[in-house]
Image: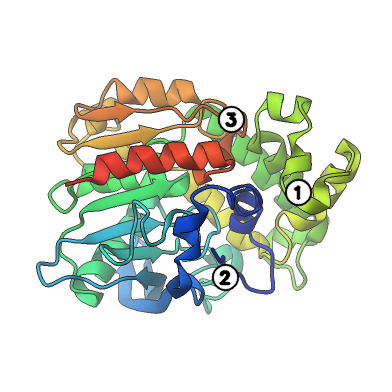
């Protein structure tokens, strides 16, 4: 199994390093037969001219970066969408893909899309004026879903999806697909992510945004060099919420990677403060936090701001896999939402690893996800 990453560290790598370090013993036979994955997904990008956002702002050129595995079959009924999570690239689901797996490129046409704001799709850091840096408008989950819908239909010739499978912010997108385009999708899978950002999440994200914006070097987003101290500080805030309280008590950071095996708590915190968001752009980080923070399927037109009404409208099957110890998307929120979904299978992941359980943080977590996913996607 290979994760393709650039020279900069990404939060997707921060989350997935656990899976890389610990999941090798699981299904090693199947993973040994994945040579086609070595090069990573086939890359692509799609440009939308004069793309109007929900806010009313029009981006002259909106770019969606994506990657694919496999081939669309003649019947065009084997496409599966995997929308990215926070700051992730199109290889962010490689841990779940492979020959003999539930998501098998020999059977499925797998499309992994990258959210606006990740530094590759249209972002504050790569968009020219008048929308460069802090002037880039907030893009919503629905903006991202609409851009991807146009990519699928106009760019890839995909007019129906077998499934949308999403982790974290990818789960937010999966729920939005089910609400906005239920006839386009046969079913959705939401792992470690909810249908809206509930109030505690809004507060948490605001604290993480302020950790960046209140340092003098941020300069209201008009910095010429990255506000490194603010980025490091927000990384520590993220880290505090990433794993469960019991995870910290049991010193499980020592199992995240070989280099952490002998680190004390203080040493691990210091290491993560330098590495968690290293190489990323502050305005990009903030943009995706705002996208996360403002999401609610209930604000979809026609649902009067009611999350319950929007979820009750979903006619397709939903596999909902929260992590039992997730502090980003708590189990209680998932239980409440599941009561409003007609065809839901609620399957909490029994794990101490908090949010990263949703990316198969341990062999047991990955086996659980794989088993549930395989059964749910079976014809």
Q: Which mark is residue 124?
A: none
Q: Is residue 217 left or right of residue 66?
A: right
Judging by the rendered image, the residue that carries numbered circle 1 is: 214
Q: Nearer the viewer, residue 357 or 45?
A: 357
Of badges 2 and 1, the one in the foreground is: 2
What is the crowding at mark 1: few (fewer than 14 residues within 10 Å), some, or many (at least 20)?
A: few
Query: How far apart are the two marked residues, 3 and 2, measured between alpha carbons?
Result: 28 Å
What is the crowding at mark 3: few (fewer than 14 residues within 10 Å), some, or many (at least 20)?
A: some
Q: To which quarter of the image does residue 146 belong?
A: bottom left
Q: State the residue lying farthest toward the front.
A: 29
Residue 99, position as x, y percentages in the image: 38, 62
Q: Earlier in the sequence, mark 1 or mark 3?
A: 1
Judging by the rendered image, the residue that carries numbered circle 3 is: 327
What is the crowding at mark 2: few (fewer than 14 residues within 10 Å), some, or many (at least 20)?
A: some
Residue 377, position as x, y percentages in the image: 25, 46
What SS does tag 2 mark? loop
What SS does tag 1 mark? loop
Question: Quick check: marks 3 and 2 in contact, CB under 8 Å?
Answer: no
């Amino acid at each position: 199994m290979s994760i393709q990453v650039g020279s900069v560290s990404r939060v997707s790598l921060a989350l997935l390093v656990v899976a890389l370090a610990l999941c090798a013993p699981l299904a090693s036979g199947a993973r040994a037969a994945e040579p086609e994955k070595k090069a990573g997904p086939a890359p692509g990008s799609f440009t939308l001219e004069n793309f109007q956002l929900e806010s009313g702002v029009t981006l002259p050129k909106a770019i969606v970066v994506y990657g694919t595995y496999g081939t669309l079959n003649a019947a065009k009924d084997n496409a599966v969408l995997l929308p990215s999570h926070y700051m992730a690239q199109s290889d962010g689901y490689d841990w779940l893909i492979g020959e003999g797996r539930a998501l098998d490129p020999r059977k499925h046409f797998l499309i992994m899309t990258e959210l606006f704001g990740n530094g590759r799709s249209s972002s504050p850091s790569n968009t020219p004026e008048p929308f460069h840096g802090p002037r880039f408008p907030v893009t919503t989950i629905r903006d991202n879903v609409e851009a991807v819908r146009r990519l699928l239909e106009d760019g890839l010739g995909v007019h129906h999806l077998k499934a949308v499978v999403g982790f974290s912010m990818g789960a937010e997108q999966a729920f939005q697909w089910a609400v906005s385009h239920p006839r386009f999708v046969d079913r959705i899978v939401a792992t470690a992510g909810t249908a809206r950002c509930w109030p505690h999440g809004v507060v948490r994200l605001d604290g993480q945004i302020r950790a960046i914006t209140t340092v003098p070097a941020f300069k209201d987003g008009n910095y010429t060099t990255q506000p490194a101290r603010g980025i490091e500080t927000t990384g520590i805030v993220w880290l505090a919420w990433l794993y469960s309280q019991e995870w910290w008590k049991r010193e499980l950071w020592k199992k995240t990677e070989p280099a952490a095996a002998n680190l004390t708590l203080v040493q691990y915190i210091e290491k993560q403060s330098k590495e968690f968001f290293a190489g990323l752009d502050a305005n990009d980080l903030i943009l995706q936090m705002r996208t996360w923070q403002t999401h609610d399927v209930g604000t979809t037109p026609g649902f009067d701001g009611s999350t319950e009404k929007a979820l009750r409208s979903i006619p397709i099957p939903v596999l909902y896999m929260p992590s039992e110890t997730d502090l980003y998307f708590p189990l209680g929120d998932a239980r409440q939402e599941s009561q409003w979904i007609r065809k839901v299978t609620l399957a909490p992941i029994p794990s101490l690893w908090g949010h990263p359980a949703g990316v198969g943080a341990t062999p047991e977590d990955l086996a659980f996800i794989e088993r549930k996913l395989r059964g749910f996607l079976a014809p």
